[in-house]
Every structure is written in C-alpha cells, then in structure tokens.
Image (spheres, rainbow, N blue to C red):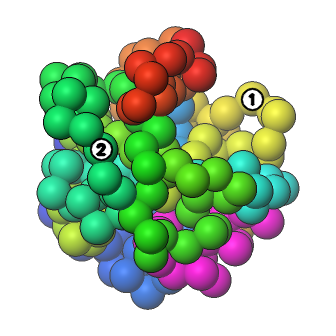
C-alpha cells in the first residue's frame, strides 16, 4: 500500500499541531482531518463541509491507547468485540468520556472512533501524537474525493495541506457499529 516520506509526515504533523486542516487517504476515500481538541480547526472543517455540529464526527487513531481519553466506560465483552476488529475498517460508536467536547459528539452520548489500518492515516496520528478528526473530503451529501485532485476541486484552498497517497481500496466508507448493541448503523 502507500507510504509517506518522513519530511511530508513532519510537515503534516506540524499543520495538525498548529490547528490546520489536512486531507489524507483513508481506507475508502480521502478524509479531512484536524486536531480533535482544536475548536477553531473543527469549526473550519465543519464550515468547509457545510456539516451541522449536531451530527458528530469520527476520530481515528493508530492505536487504541490514543483513543482512551475520549472513551467512556464499556463492558469488557463490548471492548473485546471492538479490539478484535482493530486495526481495521470498522468504526464503533462508543460512550464518550465526560470531558469530550460537544463539537466531537454532536447531539449524541457516543463518539465514533476507529483504529485505522491505513498506513498513511496511522502514520499521521503517530507523527502528530493525537487522534485525528476523520470525515470525507467533500461538501456534505456530495460525492467524496478519492484522490488529491478531487480534494482540490471539492475543497479548494480551504485545506492547508493535501497528503498524497493511495486510498485503501474499499468501495464504500467504513462500516459503523454500535459498541453496546453490536447493531450496524452504516454498512
């Protein structure tokens, strides 16, 4: 699959740390991302997508430990089921920790999280030392970008950095499942 040059990785980590927006390849499409605790960055991302804050966002990470501060209490059986699917293309709706900001959860008590197995997306999380907001690179309800040119055409100059690389080859965005019930929300 894809890899990223160390210099580009450091550049992307710097943009994330300074509150910028990046576009990067994920399992199926190009994602838009930023530091999840930077309110201004998340606000810019939501405005670019024309997405209401009430919908909530997905966080991705390279390992589960990076997501722990965002996750509330879960039964051991639910956590075991989640860990069996990670790293991989399954996003889970998990009870959010009490201190998780509303701009991440939206109107929900849960937070959508995924430990990605996409090498570039995972490398970005490692380099920045944080999970990333991950939402498709497009205006809401329009087709998502699948390459850097489509990102530029759909998002214009509102993205501070486009990380080049191949998507993971999935035809559709990752599935979303509820951690407590195991129910599928998005196939």
* Classed neighbour count for the residue bearing mark 2: other residues with Cα under 10 Å, few (<14), some (14–19), many (≥20): some
In front of the other: 19 or 107: 107
Figure quadrant of residue 101? bottom right
Q: Position of residue 32 (x, y in %)?
A: 56, 53
The residue sitting at 81% across, 33% down in the picture is 142
The residue sitting at 35% across, 68% down in the picture is 12
Residue 74: image tag: 2
Residue furthest bottom as drawn: 18
In front of the other: 180 or 14: 180
* Magenta run includes residue 45: yes
Whether residue 156 is visible: no
* Classed neighbour count for the residue bearing mark 1: other residues with Cα under 10 Å, few (<14), some (14–19), many (≥20): few
Figure quadrant of residue 75? top left
Q: Left or right: where does residue 122 sit relative to residue 174?
A: left
Q: Left or right: where does residue 154 sit relative to residue 91?
A: right
Tell me which segment is drawn in magenta: 34-48
Q: Left or right: where does residue 173 sit relative to residue 55?
A: left
Residue 154, relative to residue 79: is it above or below? below
Residue tagged by mark 1?
143
In front of the other: 91 or 45: 91
Whether residue 3 is visible: yes
Which secondary structure class fits the magenta region best? helix
Residue 124, relative to residue 40: is it above or below? above
């Amino acid at each position: 699959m894809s890899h990223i040059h160390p210099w580009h990785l450091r550049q992307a980590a710097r943009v994330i740390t300074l509150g910028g927006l990046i576009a990067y390849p994920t399992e199926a499409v190009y994602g838009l991302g930023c530091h999840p605790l930077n309110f201004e960055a998340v606000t810019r991302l939501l405005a670019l997508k024309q997405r209401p804050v009430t919908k909530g966002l997905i966080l991705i990470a390279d390992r589960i430990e990076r997501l722990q501060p965002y996750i509330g209490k879960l039964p051991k059986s639910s956590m075991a089921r989640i860990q069996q699917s990670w790293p991989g293309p399954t996003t889970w709706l998990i009870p959010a920790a009490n201190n998780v900001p509303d701009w991440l959860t939206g109107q929900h008590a849960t937070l959508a999280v995924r430990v990605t197995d996409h090498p570039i997306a995972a490398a970005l999380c490692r380099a920045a030392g944080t999970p990333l907001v991950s939402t498709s690179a497009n205006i809401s309800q329009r087709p998502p970008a699948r390459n850097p040119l489509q990102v530029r055409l759909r998002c214009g100059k509102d993205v501070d950095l486009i990380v080049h690389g191949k998507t993971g080859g999935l035809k559709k965005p990752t599935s979303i499942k509820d951690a407590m019930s195991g129910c599928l929300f998005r196939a």
